[in-house]
Image (cartoon, helix red, strand yellow):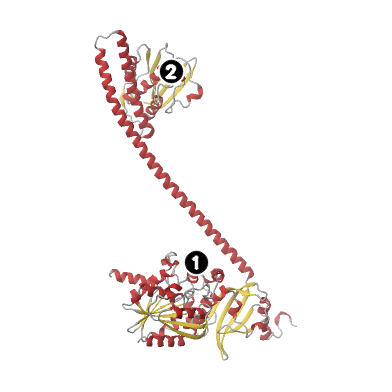
Amino acid sequence: MNENDRRAMNVRQRNNVEVAGDGPATLVFAHGFGCDKNMWRLLAPHFAPRYRTVLFDQVGSGLSDLKAYDRKKYGSLHGYASDLLEVMDATAAGPVIFVGHSVSAMIGLLAGIAAPERIAAHVMVGPSPCYINDGDYVGGFTRADIDGLLDTLESNYLGWSSSMAPAIMGAADQPELAIELTNSFCRTDPEIAKHFARVTFLSDHRADVARLEAPALVLQCSEDLIAPRSVGEFMVRTLPRPTLRILENNGHCPHLSAPTASAAAIDEFLAGLGH
Amino acid sequence: MAEGGEGELPDAEALFEDAACGLLLTGADGTIRRVNRTFCRWTGRPAEALVGKLKVQDLLTMGGKIFHQTHWAPLLQMQGAVAEVKLDVLHGDGHTLPMVMNVVRRSHPGGTFDEISTFVAEDRNKYEKELLLARRRAEELLRQQQEVQDALTRSQAELDRQRASAEGRAQFAEQMVGIVSHDLRNPLSAIQLSAYVLARAELPSPHRKALERITHSTQRAQRLIEDLLDFTVAKVGRGISVTRESIQLHQVAAGAAEELRTSFPGREIEHRTIGEGPCRGDADRLTQAIGNLVANAMTYGAFDRPVRLTSRIERETFALEVHNAGKPIPPEQLAGLFEPMTRGFDGANSARSVGLGLFIVREIARAHGGEVGVQSSAEAGTIFLLRCPR
């Protein structure tokens, strides 16, 4: 095994990388704050017949290598952007299409600015470059709101700590799914979750948005508390090559609550790029 | 009514309304479709203000709303259930109420609904807050401990640095003294040799007197240099070295006494021997010790009385004693007498020497595994004693 192979294997283990599907182009999916790569479970299979799909867990989430969590490196989104470039290097030769949810849309943005040749196009699901209101900019939150979230995370410390799996109730329609997921989905080291929340919700990358040269689809949900319409409008106003699609949907996770509409919007965007 | 619950059971409606937990039924978007009396009572909100008007997330604090979107909603979508979530619910009067919630999403013929049960968790909340507080306190203590540890490590490093620096200085001092002593000895030897040559010539009496002073002073200067060297080695260097071999103690002492008589013309030095047998010691070093003790006695003892050197061989030890008559040493000075730079008690003579002689005697004794002692009284005079194992 040569040095490159070894590095690729380390990255695959560190980020719990999962490659599926087949096709000339590669889609790389990155989950946002709060959950893990299982978030894409309803969306990624839609693309698998026509694309290679790469799913991975951000370090600190899901089944990533928690030992690799370095508070300094992941003290800004740039640490995650550098991981993302490594994941792409480890899984795809040419440029990829990047699909990022929430904070990961910004991580993809940073990676795309750092290495424009690696990402041909961006799909940003509920992106927000800055969560806190600032002058005319309406991010949706005040600093006190974010502190409230950190408190909420902390007070769910017992329930969410990875050692204590809560009783699985109901889910009668798909019990096997529930059992499989409960152990990792939304479940992580509470200290890491708090730190990730802080880094995510206190980040401000508004100045970077205009620097992304690649085309970008902004999937905006009509009623998204985390990334409200005003933020989507800022993105479209600021991105050099934006496409906006608004999904009638309640919430921040259209890939879960409206997978069909989300897939259709992405298909249309990719078709426009010649895919 | 029958005792023990054997009568007719309460209907489902009554059970729902006054259940021992708050119950809510919402659409998948969170819109409240039904709520029981228990929940309304706990939250101070009438049902008509909730049903069809608010979503369950509207009842949460902003932090809770974010949590709802980042955890609760995806979990429901992915696994159809959420268990043991603790969130602050806004009471109708504005204060917050910690509640633990279970949610299950189920499809019925009429659509998909989220069924939520809630429990007030004031006490659990308090307890958990205490736990978190204790945890933070423990982390703070750990941090402080770490800081102390770090400071200690830094002090230790500084100490090591200073020690290394001090050792460097000591070594330098030893080398300096060594070089200076060596360079001083050469001119002194030349002076001594010249005095020896002159002594063989016929000199008028006043000149002869001057020559004697030259010889005497040169010897003293040489002794001082030796002392200084030994002091430096003993105090800041490796310590005085001795080579112990079989010696005839009485012969060594007799030789030393003979030499000293020439150094102190006009003064009487008696030598007494007690006991017999071989001893192990460094003849040169013991001669040096006797020299220092006798010189001391000459300086501080009565000028008109003999100084008595005793070499004594005992069962397991040997000793050298030097006795002089005269004014006793004040008791308060006895303890520090063997420390370096301690001058004699006679103020008039204080400029005579830097006070290394007795210190070197002690170091020679210690290098032999022995010790020194002193006794002093007006009646018995002063006795310095050096005693070593044979």
Q: Left of B59 or right of it: where is B139?
A: left
Q: Secondary structure at mark 2?
A: helix
Of B317 and A52, the residue lying toward us? A52
x, y percentage for residue A61?
A: 45, 72
Residue B234 pos. (x, y %): 37, 31
**Numbered disc 1: what chain?**
A
Q: Residues within 10 Å of mark 1 (few under 14, many from 20)?
A: some
Extreme front residue here? A136
Q: Which mark is residue A191?
A: 1
Label 1 amino acid? Glu
Q: Chain of mark 2?
A: B
Q: Residue at x 38, y 70 (%)?
A: A82
Q: Which mark is residue B137?
A: none
- The disc at residue B300 is 2
Q: From the top left corner, tell me how far across and down residue B245 is, in percent.
A: 30, 27
- In the rendered image of this protein, does residue B277 appear above or below residue A159? above
Identify which residue, B63 or A216, lies in the foreground: A216
Q: Is residue A34 visible?
A: yes
- Horizontally, residue B134 falls left or right of residue A113, namely right
Which residue lies at the image location 60% right of the left edge and 63% below the top edge? B130
